[in-house]
Image (spheres, rainbow, N blue to C red):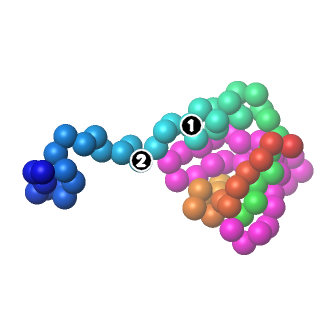
Amino acid sequence: MNDNKSTGRPEGKPRVTESTLEEIRYLRRLIENRTAVRVRLTSNEEVEGTVEYYDAAFIRLTRSGAPNLFIYKHDIKYLYEI
């Protein structure tokens, strides 16, 4: 079997993609429907609001009666709809 010297993987095998794009579809749906979510952070703190904007690195959470938040994705443990 011939190895590809630049990648270290056998020739002819496809490269596995990093993303399935499901995160993007899910975040778009949350924004379009203005779905309320609860975000659990890695510090176990929870915040509620609606996702107004997202980027590769963060989401913007709009809250009523409280300041809006920019939350880095690496600080999010999980989020769920409420």
Please, is residue 37 above or below residue 44 in the view? Answer: above
Q: Which residues are magenta?
A: 42-66
Q: Quadrant of residue 43?
A: bottom right
User: Pointer 2: residues within 10 angstroms few (<14), some, or many (20+)?
Assistant: few
The secondary element bearing badge 2 is classed as loop
The three-letter code of the residue at mark 1 reads Glu
Which residue is pictured at 10% across the width and 51% down the height? 2
The three-letter code of the residue at mark 2 reads Glu
Relative image position of residue 44 (x, y in whole percent): 77, 69
- The residues bearing labels 1 and 2 have C-alpha atoms spaced at a distance of 12 Å
> In the image, is 80 to the left or to the right of 20?
right
The secondary element bearing badge 1 is classed as helix
Which residue is pictured at 56% across the width and 37% down the height? 22
* The residue positioned farthest toward the bottom in the image shown: 43
Q: Quadrant of residue 8?
A: bottom left
The residue closer to the viewer here, 5 or 38, is 5
Relative image position of residue 58 (x, y in whole percent): 58, 52
Which residue is pictured at 63% across the width and 64% down the height? 75
Q: Which residue matches tag 1?
A: 22
Instruction: Inspect this view and state whether residue 27 appears.
Output: yes
* The residue positioned farthest toward the top in the image shown: 32
Q: Which residue matches tag 2?
A: 18
Instruction: Decide whether residue 20 is among the magenta residues.
Output: no
Instruction: Inspect this view and state whether residue 67 appears.
Output: no
